[in-house]
Amino acid sequence: MAGGNSASGGRTGVRVVVAGDRFTGKSSLIAAAATESYPENVTHVLPPTHLPADFFPDRVPITIIDTSAALENRGKLIDELKRADVVVLTYSCDQPLTLNRLSSFWLEELRRLEVKVPIIVVGCKLDLRDENQPISLEHVMRPVMHEYREIETCIECSSVTLMQVPDVFYYAQKAVLHPTSPLFDQESQSLQPRCQRALKRIFLLCDRDMDGALNDSELNEFQVKCFNAPLQPAEIVGVRRVVQEKKRNGVNDLGLTLEGFLFLHFLFIDKGRHETTWAVLRRFGYGDNLELRDDGLPVPTKHAADQSIELKTEALDFLRGTFRLFDIDNHGALRRTELEELFSTAPESPWNEAPYKGAAETTSQGNLTLKGFLSEWALMTLIDPRRSLANLIYIGYNGNPASILRVTRRKSIDRKKQRSERSVFNCLVFGPENAGKSSMLNALLGRSFSAGHNPAGERYAANVVDQLGGNKKTLILREVPEDGVKVLLSNKECLAACDVAVFVYDISDEYSWKRTRDLLVEVARQGEETGYGVPCLLVAAKGDLVPYPMALQDSLKVCRELGIEAPAAVSMKTGDLNDLFGRIIGAGESPHLNIPETETGRKRKSFRRLVNNSLLFVSVGAAFAVVGMTVFRTYNARRNSN
């Protein structure tokens, strides 16, 4: 498997910042590289120096920035370091103290400044080193490189003899265009997990007959796709022989196995040919972080804050088929190992952390059901459509990625048409502490009631809700902690993406009710002021307890005043949900109803109506005046003519 010039990852230039102690040879190094000769007289700090695109094989121009270590220039030094694509740290080969200063000052300073770019350590003035005091660079730098993984390469050079001077900036450019750290773990001497996952996906895409091995034809297709050059028969034999000598299972009767494919890339990287592996990864759409690049993810654009993004039927059909494929035991749920295997070609399993972890329906053994599986995808598509689309591609969707996501209609249009066409309803759940919000989310996921303390903070729950007539909608509940309401409402568009706002209170606790009432009014006012009014539903939780006096009367009065439905009485403990989730979806499907209207809102609406009527009256009066004037002029003209 041979590689030519690799892609540059879309970069149009590389910015190299050269830093280090005074008199370590920074300026001479730059001048020698640019002029290919030893500079007799060099300015203390050179202006930006440019190496043209044809200077190195990758054909990407380089800009080299010289810096001063003087205290008075510290501000400029910090600014340049933070703008760098790669940092070249210099020491003087004839001054061992400057080598020690790399770890005692410079490397720590770069970390403190959060300069997260590759570092090339360069020993200058090699021609001045005392021959009687030989030094092993590998021996000295090995522990330093072990501690500072950001160091890509160590090299020594001489500006006087030009020894390895061009190599310094070749390695600097290479560290940016073809970085080592995303591909290879120096400590364990193995491919990084993300690199293995990406290469596994590439292998499966190239294994067209899906027999678990790349035959000669598939290897040639791969080679042509990545390097525009087929492999000769002798080269294929050579590849197999090299792999089989080191990895017995790397080759079988059918061809090169996944183990062999990964081992080949290990060899490329081990021999310093990172550009070969990067050429493969970039040809299949990967960026420097080993995720699919944005230019390969055509996520539709929302033109308004009150629109959302959903999966189309084609994507849902693909996901159902994928679920069945990985449900090896046909138990209707994916075990953790099956889920890990499903996402083994993605950078990582996307649902191992918040907000996805624990947000969907599982069996009593903790396995993900089909409803839970589809709900996780609906949640990810709502929150992060780019990530959802990328993961669909990672797990094997090979259709047109531009055709599987859809942007919903604006909610303002839904209200006018008095009907929502959405398949996924996004709901905010408000309420004071211990009102029963978490129990409500657990009930949506089919989990049994627990009197224990639920985890505090924001969380999500998503599930498919069956409705009359076999219709299915996905309901997503987002629990808003009481102390998080102020932060949420500080965003003027926070209600734009919300389909229904649910307010939960403990029917036995008067304070719980009053706090919930205040939250309801607060959200209603926010909707009136921003134009993003949202249907609201009150939930009287803990119906198994004795209501506080006047509970029913107070809540009904507030609902009448605001113009919304009476509270839905439920008990999560007894399982009496009173069709709660059906009601929430019903409120979302009829977005023109149950939008609360405060007294201030009514006055504002009445005032607008009065102003509009006045304008209409003035307009009509003006029209009559114009007509009257026209009639008068016509009459006057006729009289004068007679």
Image (cartoon, rainbow, N blue to C red):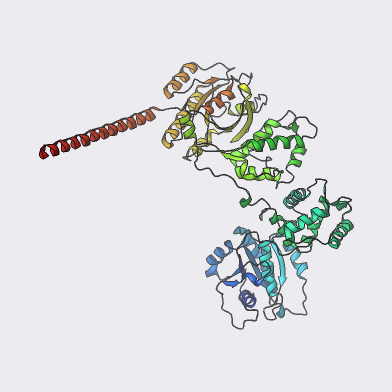
Query: As drawn, which residue projects farthest toward the bottom?
Result: 40
Q: Where is residue 88 in the image (x, y as percent from the top left)?
A: 65, 68
Viewer-nearest residue: 254 or 331: 254
Identify the residue shown where x is 66% and y is 56%.
288
Which residue sits at x=41%, y=28%? 598
Q: Judge from the rendering whether residue 337 lies leftward or rightward of residue 107; answer left or right.
A: right
**Quadrant including the N terminus:** bottom right
Where residue 625 sits, quadrant-wise, is top left
Residue 507 appears anywhere in the view: no
Number of dots carrying numbers: 0
Question: Horizontally, is 220 left or right of 179 in the view?
Answer: right
Work out whether 113 lies above or below 311: below
Residue 156: image location, x then y, percent: 71, 73
Q: On the image, which quarter does residue 393 sit in? A: top right
Classify residue 132 as left or right of residue 404: right
Measuring from the top left, give residue 339's x and y in whole percent: 74, 38
The picture places residue 582, in percent across and down from the top left corner, at: 58, 23
